[in-house]
Image (cartoon, helix red, strand yellow):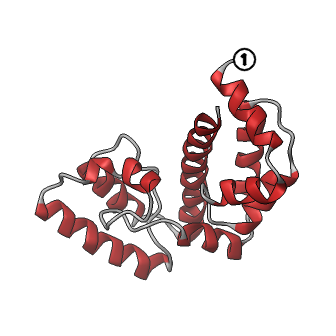
Amino acid sequence: MTDQRAGIAAFDALSDDAAYRAVLGCCSSPGFARTLVEGRPYGSVAALLDAADAASARLPEAELGAALAGHPRIGEPPQSAASAREQAGVAGAADAVRAALAAGNRAYEERFGHIYLVCASGRSAEELLALLNARLRNDPETERQVVRTELGKINRIRLRALLEQRS
């Protein structure tokens, strides 16, 4: 059995409560976690990730807010090991870049009413700052769709990591 198959088999075999807590560790939206738990068994990583994408796209606003609440601001101390890995490109950033990220985060929150969410994995602090500045030009509806897309990317990364831990 491959690692991916072992991971999905282990995830599918978890109790509902254990699976719910595991998914909630990937995305802090209770509705997202419930949807993925109720969709089991998946049988394949692709099926789980497809279900996660669909669940992310359909999250009601309150659940999207709950998902966003589980993420730190870019450039602030991470709340979890996953966030620390994802924001590794910010760790050694120059003070000026960190200050610009902090100012950009404040401007973003004032404009859109929620944190700047971006899939930070593999990106430098400078790249994240450039993306932030570009996204500040979005209209609220466009930005909401970008946020859902970024959340989906993060959820996929975290779910894959969860399955790797289970294999």
**Which percent across, then down, holds residue 165?**
58, 38
Which residue is painted at 56% across and 46% down in the image?
Answer: 158
Q: Residue furthest top?
A: 1
The reply, left or right, for residue 6 in relation to residue 86 is right
Q: Amino acid at mark 1?
A: Met
**Whether residue 58 can be seen here:** no
Spot occupied by residue 36 in the image (x, y as percentages of width and height): 79, 52
What is the number of callouts on the image?
1
Q: Nearer the viewer, residue 106 or 157?
A: 157
Which residue is more in the foreground, 63 or 140?
Answer: 63
Residue, far left: 95
Query: On the rendered structure, is 118 left or right of 104?
Result: right
72 relative to 128 in the view: left or right: right
Residue sitting at x 46%, y 71%: 115
Image x and y of residue 16, in percent: 83, 56
Determine crowd level at label 1: few under 14, some 14-19, many 20+ residues with C-alpha closer than 10 A.
Answer: few
Residue at x 73%, y 64% (from the top left corner): 59
Judge whether residue 13 can be spotted in this image: yes
Task: Report the residue marked by disc 1.
Answer: 1
Query: Which percent across, then down, holds residue 73?
Result: 39, 68
Residue 162, located in which quarter of the rendered image?
top right
**Please, what secondary structure does the residue beneath circle 1 have?**
loop
Q: Measured along the vertical axis of the image, is residue 2 above or below residue 62?
A: above
* The N terminus lies in quadrant: top right
Residue at position x 78%, y 32% in the image = 9
Q: Does 76 appear above or below 55?
A: below
49 shown above or below 72: above
Q: Is residue 97 above or below residue 2?
A: below
